[in-house]
Image: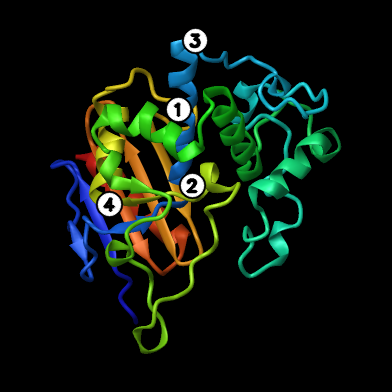
């Protein structure tokens, strides 16, 4: 069985090997939907500063939006009623390649007919919703998404050098296949960036987890974090990478990143370590 390179970083109370298969914790890797934590935290920071209100209607910031009833809060907590994926993206091997900022701009006037549920009624995880949220935040703060996240979230946490939409090529790790050739990654630097396109060092992503959840450096965690009892967590998966980040209020935490293998298996590994520490 082929060993999947991975990096595991954890608090002292979790008995987990720290690295497996030569995965460098200081190299940049895809973090997938863990990017949403950056987007959600940026939204909370802008709300705290008074730049926007979470209950603002979407059309306040994306002015070409028709009346939909969607607020920024709905986008933030996945209750917007928008579908999980942008229209047309699931048919391609590189599913988000065509989902450019121009494509998103063309969808904004049609959001009323793209709804699959009533805003605010029920929760439905939506990459599309977080792409729209990222665009709205960028419009409210009058700067590109990556710069917004750097200024509002990463720099205050001392992590600006650990995250990037386009990492240095000589520091980016990708899964390998036949003859150890790098496997092609999805195109995630367009409109989908706020939902799942950022890269980070594993060490930086682990620090993001602890500073936001354990130390509460920026206040209460954003609603983006998923909850399972007392555990706050988020995961992410791309074409050939997956990640899991989770922490308990008492300070126990774990971050896992794997190059290759299934995202479900990454979640299972994290769950087994976390269950063990809660039983001890």
Distance in Å between CA atoms under marks 2 and 1: 15 Å
Label 3 Cα neighbours within 10 Å, binned few <14 / some 14-19 / many ≥20: few
Point out residue 59 in the picture as x, y percentages from the top left corner. Answer: 73, 22
Q: Are marks 2 and 4 in contact (CB under 8 Å)?
A: no
Q: Earlier in the sequence, mark 1 or mark 4?
A: 1
Q: Secondary structure at mark 3?
A: loop
Question: Looking at the image, which is closer to me, 31 or 265?
Answer: 31
Label 1 Cα neighbours within 10 Å, binned few <14 / some 14-19 / many ≥20: many
Question: Looking at the image, which is closer to me, 16 or 40?
Answer: 40
* Left or right: 214 as drawn, with respect to 104: left
Residue 246 in sight in this render: yes
Q: Which residue is mark 3?
A: 50
Q: Earlier in the sequence, mark 3 or mark 2?
A: 2
Q: Quadrant of the N terminus?
A: bottom left
Q: Secondary structure at mark 4?
A: helix
Distance in Å between CA atoms under marks 2 and 4: 14 Å
Residue placed farthest to the right in the image? 113
Q: Which mark is residue 167?
A: none
Q: Earlier in the sequence, mark 3 or mark 1?
A: 1
The nearer-to-camera label among 3 and 2 is 3
Label 4 Cα neighbours within 10 Å, binned few <14 / some 14-19 / many ≥20: many
Q: Which mark is residue 33?
A: 2
Q: Which residue is mark 4?
A: 202
Q: Which residue is mark 1?
A: 42
């Amino acid at each position: 069985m082929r060993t999947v390179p991975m990096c595991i970083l954890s608090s002292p109370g979790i008995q987990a090997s720290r690295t497996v298969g030569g995965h460098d914790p200081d190299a940049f890797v895809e973090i997938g939907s863990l990017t949403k934590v950056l987007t959600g935290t940026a939204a909370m920071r802008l709300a705290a500063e008074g730049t926007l209100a979470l209950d603002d209607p979407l059309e306040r910031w994306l002015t070409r939006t028709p009346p939909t009833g969607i607020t920024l809060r709905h986008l933030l907590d996945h209750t917007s009623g928008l579908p999980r994926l942008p229209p047309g993206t699931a048919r391609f091997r590189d599913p988000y390649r065509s989902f450019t900022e121009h494509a998103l701009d063309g969808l904004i006037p049609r959001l009323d007919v793209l709804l699959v549920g009533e805003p605010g009624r029920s929760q439905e995880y939506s990459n599309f919703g977080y792409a729209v949220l990222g665009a709205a935040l960028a419009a409210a703060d009058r700067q590109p998404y990556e710069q917004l996240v750097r200024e509002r979230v990463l720099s205050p946490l001392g992590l600006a050098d650990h995250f990037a939409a386009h990492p240095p090529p000589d520091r980016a790790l990708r899964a390998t296949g036949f003859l150890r050739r790098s496997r092609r990654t999805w195109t995630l630097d367009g409109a989908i960036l706020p939902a799942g396109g950022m890269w980070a060092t594993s060490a930086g992503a682990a620090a993001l987890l602890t500073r936001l959840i354990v130390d509460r450096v920026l206040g209460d965690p954003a609603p983006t974090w998923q909850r399972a009892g007392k555990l706050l967590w988020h995961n992410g998966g791309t074409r050939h990478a997956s990640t899991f980040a989770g922490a308990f209020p008492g300070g126990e935490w774990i971050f896992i990143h794997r190059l290759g293998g299934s995202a479900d298996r990454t979640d299972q590994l994290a769950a087994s370590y976390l269950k063990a520490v809660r039983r001890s």
